[in-house]
């Protein structure tokens, strides 16, 4: 359930509770409002049940995801710590600081961000294996680490993946929630007659029909970048985003991450020495995961 869906659920509860309190005002004198009120109560109850069913359906998938996430986060923490010891001995402070040995840095992050962070530290250690192997981090350690990352990322655990695997219950919930929104529209229309005759009733009910403010959080934007010719992942693409000071670089899997993206309309830019520059208009939804897939075209080779 998204934050906006949760806000609509809270709106439904508030509207039903409000109409319950004013039931004596319209129950015997306004059959039209009474009918929609009864329908709203029934639709809201159905929505609660379908939300519980959808949530329970997701739980089984998420449990395996959480276990895999904790396991790979511990491995990341252990390997990064060992690599940092070796790099500090070599006085390579820059490379050492690029690794994060805190398990919670990976485990406490959202699935999308955790995947990017895990792949980033794997790339750093793998690309600098000659410096840290074999006594501190062995090639076998790195291979095992990558396998654990792949296991974690392929498990259906996030809402998006679960919904793709089993959409029936989630679709039922969304359908039920849509009916309650339609009920709210009907209630607002039927309340117009009370604007002058009973303003307290009118304004109180209308206030209860408003969707509560959705908490704004700076959610990550995860971008996958591939070659338009052969579909291969493109690494080392430099990114830019409207009103953001971050300039992320895509990793070996073509994944680029913005961890502190604000909501709204943005322009994302992409540049690479071997590809034509690209800009894309996107809309970031606050409080939800945002993903984007783009392709870049190689710069044509001009023969002289």
Image (cartoon, grey):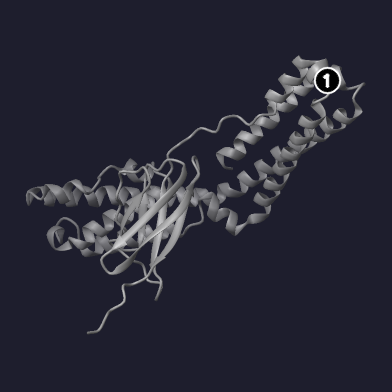
Within 10 angstroms of label 1, few (less than 14), some, or many (20 or more) residues?
few
* Residue in view at x 34 percent, y 43 percent: 244
Determine which residue is flagged by label 1: 23
* Residue in view at x 56 percent, y 54 percent: 162
Vertical position of residue 243 compared to residue 279: above or below: above
Taking 249 as reference, is 191 left or right?
right
Taking 25 as reference, is 80 left or right?
left
Residue 210 location in percent, x, y?
66, 29
Residue 90 location in percent, x, y?
7, 52
The reply to whether residue 198 is visible in this rendering is yes
Which residue is situated farthest in the front direction here?
A: 304
* Residue in view at x 30 percent, y 46 percent: 246
Asked which quadrant contains residue 9, the reply is: top right
Which residue is situated farthest in the left direction here?
A: 90
The reply to whether residue 72 is visible in this rendering is no
Asked which quadrant contains residue 195, the reply is: top right
Vertical position of residue 61 compared to residue 227: above or below: above
Taking 192 as reference, is 253 left or right?
left
Residue 62 location in percent, x, y?
51, 49
Mark 1 secondary-structure assignment: helix
């Amino acid at each position: 359930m998204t934050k906006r869906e949760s806000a609509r659920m809270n709106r439904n509860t508030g509207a039903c509770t409000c109409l319950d309190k004013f039931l004596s005002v319209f129950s015997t004198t306004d059959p039209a409002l009474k009918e929609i009120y009864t329908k709203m109560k029934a639709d809201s109850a159905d929505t609660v049940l379908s939300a519980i069913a959808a949530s329970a359906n997701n739980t089984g998938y998420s449990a395996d995801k959480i276990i895999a996430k904790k396991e790979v986060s511990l491995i990341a923490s252990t390997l990064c710590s060992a690599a940092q010891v070796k790099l500090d001995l070599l006085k390579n402070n820059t490379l050492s600081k690029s690794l994060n040995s805190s398990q919670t840095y990976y485990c406490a992050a959202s699935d999308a961000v955790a995947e990017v962070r895990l792949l980033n530290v794997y790339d750093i250690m793998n690309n600098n294996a000659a410096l840290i192997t074999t006594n501190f981090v062995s090639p076998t350690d790195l291979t095992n680490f990558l396998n654990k990352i792949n296991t974690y990322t392929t498990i259906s655990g996030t809402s998006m993946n679960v919904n793709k695997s089993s959409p029936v219950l989630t679709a039922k919930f969304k359908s039920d929630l849509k009916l309650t929104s339609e009920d709210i529209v009907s209630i607002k229309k039927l309340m117009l007659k009370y604007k002058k005759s009973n303003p307290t009733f009118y304004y109180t009910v209308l206030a209860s029909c408003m969707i509560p403010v959705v908490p704004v959080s700076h959610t990550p934007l995860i971008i996958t970048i591939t070659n338009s010719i052969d579909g291969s992942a493109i690494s080392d693409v430099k990114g830019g985003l409207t009103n953001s000071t971050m300039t992320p670089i895509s990793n070996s899997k073509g994944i680029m991450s913005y961890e502190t993206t604000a909501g709204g309309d943005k322009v994302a830019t992409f540049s690479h020495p071997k590809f034509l520059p690209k800009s894309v208009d996107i809309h970031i939804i606050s409080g939800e995961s945002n993903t984007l897939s783009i392709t870049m075209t190689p710069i044509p080779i001009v023969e002289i």
